[in-house]
Image (cartoon, helix red, strand yellow):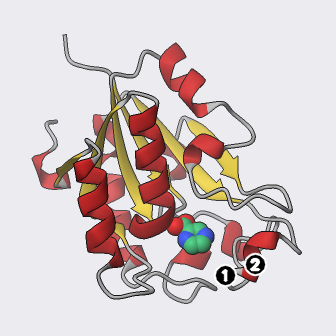
Amino acid sequence: MAKKRCLLIVDLQNDFCPGGALAVTGGDEIIAPVNRIMSRFDLVVASRDMHPRGSRHFEKWPVHCVRGSRGADFHPDLTIAAVDCFLEKGTSLEDDGYSDFESTNLDLAAFLREQAVEELFVCGLATDYCVKETVLDALRHGFATIVIEDCVRAVDLHPGDGRRALATMRERGAAIVASAGLAL
Ligand code: VGL
C-alpha cells in the first residue's frame, strides 16, 4: 500500500510575500506549485505565525504576522479549502515559534503519529528559518522528511543562507525533491 503522506505548508502568509512586512523574494512564486500538489497528499496541514503586538520576536525582526492583521492572513491565492488542519505558532510574547512543532494549538508530532503519517513533505516560507527549524524538528521526532525544493524560498539575510539551510537539512537526513517529481 502507498505510504500515508502529509504536506506541511509553512507560513504562506501575506507578510512573507512581496509587499509584506518581512517579504521573502519570490515568496509568492511557490503558491501555484503548492496548490498544484495539494491533492496528491492524504493530509494537508498549514501553519501561520501569529504574533501578539509587543512580542519579543520583534526585537529581532520587523513587526510581521500580528494576529488580526492582513499580514497574518494566508496569501489569498493559496487554496485554503484543501487544508485539513491549521496550526498557529509564535503566539506568546516570548515565543519565536520558528518550528511548526512549536505550534500552540495542536501537538503536531502527536497529531502526525495519531494520523499514522509515514512521510512528511515540507514546503513554504522561509527556507532558512521556519522551514529549516520545522524540518530539523521533524527529523528529531523521527519522521521521514522531504523538502520540496521549488516550493520553498529563503529570507537570505546573508547571501547563501537558503542554500546552506537546505544543505543542513540534507545532512541531518531530509530528502530534497522537486514538486514535478511527486507521483500522482
Ligand atoms: C520567519 C523570520 C522571522 C519564517 C519567521 O517564517 O521563516 N522568518 N519570522
Residue 47 percent coordinates (x, y): 58, 50
Q: Secondary structure at mark 2?
A: helix
Q: Position of residue 52 (x, y in %)?
A: 85, 66
Q: Residues within 10 Å of mark 1 (few under 14, many from 20)?
A: few
Q: Which quarter shows the N terminus?
A: top left
In the rendered image of this protein, does residue 27 appear above or below residue 95? below
The residue that mark 2 highlights is: 58
- Tell me the residue at 57%/47% (across/down): 100
Q: Residue at x 76, y 58 (%)?
A: 95
Task: Please name the residue shown 39% across and 87% down the image.
Answer: 158
Pointers 1 and 2 in contact (C-beta within 8 Å): yes
Residue 29 showing in the rendered view: yes
Give SS at disc 1: loop
Task: Determine whether, in the image, residue 120 is placed left or right of residue 182.
Answer: right
Residue 93 tag number: none
Q: CA distance from mark 1 to mark 2?
A: 5 Å
Q: Is residue 111 above or below residue 96?
A: above
Residue furthest out toward the top? 1
Q: Which residue is mark 1?
A: 61
Give the percent coordinates (x, y) of residue 77.
Answer: 48, 66
Identity of the residue drawn at 38% across and 37% down: 139
In this rendering, position of residue 4 left or right of residue 184: right
